[in-house]
Amino acid sequence: MITKNRALFKLKVSDLFPLKDRLFHLIFPEKCTACSAELSTSDRHLCPFCLLDLDYTYFEKYTEATAVEKLFWGRVPIEQAYAHLFYRKGGSTQQILHALKYTYNGQIGRAFGKSIGQSLRQQQKWMDVDVLVPVPIHPKKEFTRGYNQSALIAEGISESMGIPVQSLGLQKSTHTASQTRKGRFLRWENVQNNFSLSSQSDFTGKHIVFVDDVITTGATLESLIRTVLDKYPDIRISVISLAFAA
Ligand SMILES: [Zn+2]
């Protein structure tokens, strides 16, 4: 106990700021985004247990086609696709995606976006990308939620890769009901006519990357890519998602 107290008096001026942070933490403790456990001052967003539970795909190390790329085969032409984490029901990734969508948590969206950027920025094949385009959500949803979660991820990627973010002048034209209980066919019918493009954006001749929070069947992205290719037949399209339900 005595040694501990002595150690306190040995604090240097430069240590005062962390101490201030620690005091702030005592009053407003940050909680783990995934499990709500109280975080220690050295942790950010996730506790060590949830951090260990994250299932990284390591797709950036693949030389052959990845599972998320194969998902689009025979459906729409894409240059390449990347997903950062595998989505497992009940895992940390599910909790993170939920927090990203339903509790305003811009910080964690940007933090994971940065992490994606760090994985991809050394990769030759991602170097000629011109613009990051967040997958749009219904304007009504964006209004009530206050943000588009995919835009937050795109901002983080942009920060670490230096690629600009541009919103697509594209809107979902109808309010889709929850798709989770529907099968693949129903879901496809549900989304295929739901997008309309506005004329503000010009992506002629560019390599654009759609940024999404989670890819399950790929139906939403397929619909989006078809719509965009109708308008800009000469563009190249790639996809980045935070999570992938394999
Ligand atoms: Zn946790």
Image (cartoon, rainbow, N blue to C red):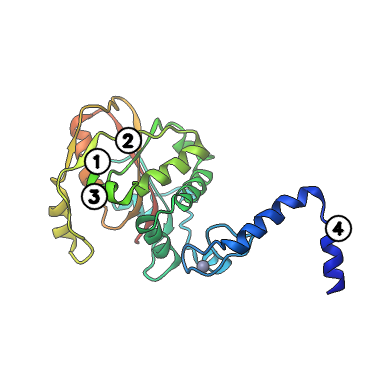
- Left or right: where 16 falls relative to 69: right
The reply to whether callout 1 and callout 4 are in contact (CB within 8 Å) is no
Residue 79 % position (x, y)? 34, 39
Between disc 1 and disc 4, the foreground one is 4
- The mark nearer the N terminus, 1 or 4, is 4
Q: What amino acid type should be assigned to the residue bearing mark 2? A: Ser
Q: What amino acid type should be assigned to the residue bearing mark 4? A: Lys
> Residue at point 23% right, 37% down?
170
Q: What amino acid type should be assigned to the residue bearing mark 3? A: Thr
Query: Which residue is under mark 4?
Result: 10
The reply to whether callout 3 and callout 1 are in contact (CB within 8 Å) is no
Residue 234 % position (x, y)? 26, 27
Q: What amino acid type should be assigned to the residue bearing mark 1? A: Ile
Is residue 127 in sight in this rendering?
yes
Numbered label tally: 4
Crowding around mark 4 (Cα neighbors within 10 Å: few <14, some 14 to 19, many 20+) is few
> Residue at point 48% right, 68% down?
36
Residue 229 % position (x, y)? 22, 34
Q: CA distance from mark 3 to mark 1?
A: 9 Å
Q: CA distance from mark 3 to mark 2?
A: 17 Å
Query: Which residue is under mark 3?
Result: 220
**In the rendered image, which quarter is residue 223 located in?**
top left
Residue at the front extreme, as displayed: 27
Q: CA distance from mark 4 to mark 3?
A: 58 Å
Query: Which residue is under mark 1?
Result: 225
SS state under label 3: helix
